[in-house]
Image (cartoon, rainbow, N blue to C red):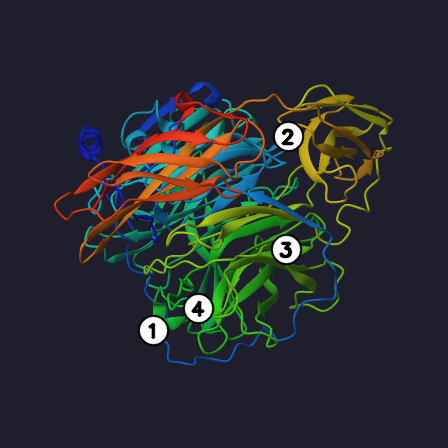
Amino acid sequence: MHRPFLIAGFVTLAGAVGAAAQQPPLPSPAVEHRPTIILPQHHDVTPPLRDMPIIPPGLEREESPHAPLPVRGGPKTSPGPQDGALQTDPPGRHAIVGANGFEGIGNNDGVLPPDTNGDVGLNNYIQWVNLSFAIFDKAGRPLMGPMSGRTLWQTFGGPCATRNDGDPIVLYDEAAGRWFMSQFALPNYPRGPFYQCIAVSRTSDPTGAWALYSYTFSKMNDYPKFGVWSDGYYMSINQFSSTGAWAGEGVAAFNRAKMIAADPTAEMVYFDMASNASLGGMLPADIDGATPPPSNAPEPYIQFDDSPTELQLWQFHVDWNNTAASTFTRKALLPTSSFNSNMCNGSRNCIPQPGTTVKIDAIADRMMYRLQYRNFGDHESLVTNHTVNVGSNRGGVRWYEIRNPSSTPTLYQQGTLAPTSDTLNRWMGSVAMDKDGNLGVGYSVSSSTTYPSIRFSGRLASDTTLNTLTVTESDLQAGTGYQSHSSGRWGDYSMLAVDPSDGCTFWYTTEYYTSGATSAGWRTNIGSFRLGNCGSAATVPNDPSALTVNATSSSTIHLTWADNSSDETGFQIERCAGASCSSFANLTTTAAGATTFDDTGLTASSSYSYRVRAINAAGASGYSNTASATTDSAPVENDVWVSALAGVSATSRNGWTATATVTVDVTSGSRSGITVTGTWTAGGGTKTCTTDASGTCQITSSQLSKKSTSTTLTITGLAGSGLTYTPSQNFKGAITVTR
């Protein structure tokens, strides 16, 4: 429902309409509370993604967002009920263990909001925002991308290949060692048919081949959210009619076993729940951890109601041998402490920011992603959250832990993080538990004096007092700017994941702004942190020893060490910039028994420190000694090129102005201080700008005549000390801005 909409640019829709006209007829509408079985509209298997052409990010087709969900339980009146689970004291009993982070994808596509999400596997992190994704190693080095979401479906044909409509989700299926990615395609918006595009990797390597599927819906399948379960991939959607009217909750299950096998008959079991007016904004559960749910346990779904304040727990049971016997039924109503979900009467302009009168979206009408599931053996836990009004339209994060959803569901604990010692809004949260039961919470903060920033807190499993976060609130990324775009669109969702390689490291991604950013110049951060002494109770493998490191070139350092363990499942390589430092970040995980590693892509004449960690199946670890080395001197010349271009326009009484945001990249070294030269048509002239630390700067045209409807900027040169401009490497060397 909160779909991206274009900030600037235009495209032709002829190709998408032509593809849609060839689609088969839609299945008959579902009978409510009875399943409809839908086979894939199309299926294919890709070549390895690493061998496919990358479709670069760029301005996409325009979309119009729908209205927010109807407020369940009737309209609220200010101030609403007092929050019955308010945590008034700031969390601070436990210090943080350590936090790291790296820059994620920025607004390469000129859209709001980013719909930021990502997940972590054994060796990789994949982030997907509107409307592009990237594959990183765990040190933050991009292996592929950013690239258009269409890259994955480019060989597929049909709307999934021709459209890039967003609302993306990426998940790591830990039990199968596979990646799951999905977004919708709306070639005929606001009329159907509508499509859900799904990709499942053929191995644990996301740069390898993928099995592709598409499924059709007669109602708009908005705001799709997914969860991995033992027997299926489960989805919730907020449905809308062709007039934009609310059309009820929809839920669906996809045959996971067949998708993993790339079987073209992988069916979807769909329930249209429109007749139940209390349903909307649901989340399906998503498994973390090595222990599966109890045998034949149905998939849990959760949503909140606010009159009375409660959680609805539903169960989706699919009989894959007789899909017509599948059911979607309510398991329990769980009363909660009182809360008020009415933030600014549903207005998207709600959360204040410094330096501007523009306010941003609270999205307090639905659960916030994810609904994480863990089986601890002696109990099961579901954790999730949503945004509430703690008074005077100040946002707080209401979080929950529900125990034993498969048997006797109980609301075990709940709390609202909104300390009275400050005036911050806390919202757009995501929560998860590590394998020891420590609870992590990531969220955004903002106020009239604090720029929108990314923070986290949590509580330890050993804490004896329930309903309270106890880990000191800390920044993952402090913002230094604000969003000035009047739409107010913000986030739509964020995601907190847990690293399957150790079961302890949390990974969180969401958006923020820097000073001087354009009105829609959002950036994203991918941060990681740990809580307590997660994993320390397990038997620790013997420490690796005799670690030595030697530079073999200006960009490579060679590591060797001694293997003293027999029970390790692999070695984690950790690196820190500098000859003496303590903030190590994970690079990669090698195979068991490995004793060498080459760290490549480094900066010339720079010092790096390393340590090697042996890990076992229990997640326990032992460290080697720390060793340092300095890379050789760099070659005199390095390549520099344009990696992204985005344009906007502004009209005044005397004419109009075009502005382009130019992003450059280099083979190695700094991206700052590079002089960018570009020439505008339509009388705009030749202009220059100088890049900042992120490799970005802006080139603005002169006042253009109202007689001209567009102007094109062509980059004619990039200049920096010791750099060589290579136009052939440009992702995009020109951009047209229309008035």
Q: In terms of sequence position, does the residue under pointer 2 or pointer 4 come before the other?
A: 4
User: Earlier along the polypeptide chain: callout 3 or callout 2?
Assistant: 3
Q: CA distance from mark 3 to mark 1?
A: 33 Å
For residue 514, above or below residue 463? above
Q: Which residue is mark 2?
A: 603
Q: Earlier in the sequence, mark 1 or mark 4?
A: 1
The answer to whether residue 731 is above or below residue 503 is above
Q: Which label is found at residue 74? A: 1
- The image's mark for residue 352 is 4
Residue lying at 64% horizontally and 68% vertically, measured from the top left: 467
Callout 3: SS: strand
Mark 2: amino acid: Thr
Q: In what element is the residue under mark 2?
A: loop
Tell me whether circle 3 and circle 1 mark residues in contact (CB < 8 Å).
no
In the image, residue 439 lies at what x, y percent?
A: 65, 56
Query: Camera-side residue: 681 or 348?
Result: 681
Q: Which residue is mark 3?
A: 440
